[in-house]
Amino acid sequence: MSAPDTRHTYSDSIAGYVTTYEPTRERFGLRTSDGREVTIHLDEALNSQIVRNLGEPPKDTTGATRDMLAEGRYVFVYGIFYQWEGGQRIEARQLTFPEESRGAYVFEHPSWWVRQAAEIADFYLRGHFPDGVYDWRNFRTKLTLHGTHVVESADSDVRQETDTISRLVYGLATAFMLTGEERFLQAAESGTEYLREHMRVVDERENVVYWYHGIDITRNGQRKVFASEFGDDYDAIPMYEQIYALAGPTQTYRITGDPQILSDIDHTVRLFDKYFRDQERGGFFSHLDPITMDPRADALGRNRSRKNWNSVGDHAPAYLINAYLATGRKDFAKLLEETADTIAEHFPDEPNSPFVQERFHADWSPDRTWGWQQDRAVVGHNLKIAWNLTRIRALADKPEYAQLAERIAEIMPAVGSDQQRGGWYDVVERQEDPATGGHRLVWHDRKAWWQQEQSILAYLILAGVSGDPEHRRLAREAAAFYNAFFLDYDDGGVYFNVLANGIPYLIGTERLKGSHSMAGYHALELCYLAATYTGLLLTSSPLTLHFRPLPASFPDRVLRVAPDLLPAGSIQIDKVWIDDQLYQDFDPKGLTVNLPASDTPLKVRVEVEPVEMRLRISSEFDGKTAHIKLAGIVDREELEKFRRGLNEALSVNPRRVEFHLGEVTEMARPAINELLFQRTKIGMDVDFVIVGCALPEVSQALVATDAFLLDARGSSDD
């Protein structure tokens, strides 16, 4: 009897860094994120592309594939895997590069996340309001893959869930902050008003506000749904629903300063303190009985006297950080610190498990038998803790916050990420499997969009705060996977889940782009904060934010514009425009703008920048002349930023280009060569003019080529 055939053939993906390229043997070496070395074989069936953003055409690079296989370049490989006893061969069919050139990751371009935010927000506006009228009576919790409402039968009731609306309002308000596009703010304001009118309950007797689970739109009107009807929380008032009911209104408040919204925030926080807070042992209970408002009621069943990640940790990202950013209030800062203290004290579980403990009894003893979770870990919750503890350090820089955040960041890749293909898993067993020594995946090896968001933001902010290149590498790998596989170029928006190899998973509720779990919140939060952390903490690029304060809005007419909780003294305001006119009454270090008196909403645009910027580059176009202003150092480290700024300035096809170099303190030869190269590319019929230069050797080198003119105005015009 012959031995069984041990050969296996299957398609799969693998990601890593190019180590070698052997053109004569048509193969290259690849090192995975965890250091494994493999060989990738090429043939005539190969094609390649560069990762593109939503709204962009394909970037086919098949013809240049082999020239792009430079050492150190990150690449996703999809192909055929042949395995047999003692050997393996991987034949590539598709290569996807997240870098335009080595080190130039597409998602680190200053406009990448801003453009993506606009595309995603427009996807949801088209889906819910195809007529362009932002009437939230027409909102539906479920939205199809294609961005349309699920077909309803003539006599069916329609459920509108409060949290889903609030999360979408958050996303739309966030898109306005990044883009300044009026349609996003109009939809966010009308959505906030709809929540206040239809989903809010003002209990004047108890002086609190709470929020319905949702409403059913029926043939005869509306029916309020008081307690949750979601499976895990059935017939209870879950804390996380009340928390996320504030997400959209709070972000809208940051823009408008509407005092009615702030009143709702205060009264809902009073609800948390009055009913959810454990006055004896600290923290917040996860559920209330809807009749008695008692977290210890027997009617709550498995949710009786319980605390969890959502009831403790979700305050910070959902509303509390944004409420603090908008107001600067000490009570919000105190609650943030309390939340971080509670997490640092009770959630770590080493040496029992590398994952945090997520569910607790009232006395903070772990609950490892609850429902679907049992003794399982949600990978994204661990990363979310690292992300938010690092944010809160800007208010209370306690060593235990930094230690826990860094420890999570250190141990998570090996136990929560896919180190062959890239990306982060969903739910895993908290304890190692004795047979394999690893943490088994619970239901599947799919990867959810929101878990990728947590990994990107955690490692971005840690890289920005610590300067650790390992954090930067992991942030780039996570952002590369997300942008390569989660963007839906055909229908718009982002996919809920992808398979381990990055192919979209389009079955059941995971086929939807609007549901109880998905409403644009995480995708747009990612755009906003990835733009913030990348530009202000990592690439020294300014960030532009938009606000629309109402006439009777922020106390003392002080607009607070800090984009997030960032290290003290790391950023400042550079410029402010009010109603499109430059405005000077602002505190650059304090990140506040003193608003003028007005009877109408003000249009405020603010440019925030890192305090320490090695290179500042900006450009303006007056219809004929592109004015390019440079300040600081233009060396090899800043060459890519310099090149990118030049390309943007020259993309408008100017007839004349003026370079204002009066504040340049150093310009390396590669930067001078880049100017000469661009001069040749644009053509000699366009004048390149130097208007002032603090470095005579630079102006002399450029003028000596006979390709540049020297403006007689000198440096005084700078």
Image (cartoon, rainbow, N blue to C red):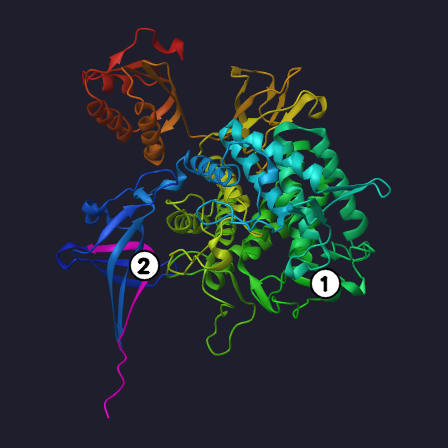
Mark 1 neighbour class, 10 Å CA radius: few under 14, some 14 to 19, many 20 or more: many
Q: Residue at x 57, y 24 (%)?
A: 588
Residue 417 is tagged as: none
Image quarter (top left, top right, bottom left or bottom right) of the N terminus:
bottom left
Q: Residue at x 75, y 38 (%)?
A: 266
Residue 303 is tagged as: 1
* Residue that label 2 marks: 31
Q: Residue at x 69, y 25 (%)?
A: 553
What percent of the width, then of the height, locates residue 458? 52, 49
The residue segment tinted magenta is: 1-21
In the image, 470 versus 10, the foreground residue is 10
Residue type of the residue flagged with mark 2: Arg
Which badge, 1 or 2, comes first in the chain's sequence?
2
What percent of the width, then of the height, locates residue 265? 72, 38
Instruction: Identify the image quadrant of residue 493.
Output: top left
Position of residue 619 in the picture relative to residue 334 (left or right): left
- Height in image: 387 above or below 709? below
Q: Residue reaching furthest bottom?
A: 1
In the image, 280 versus 587, the foreground residue is 280
- Tag count: 2
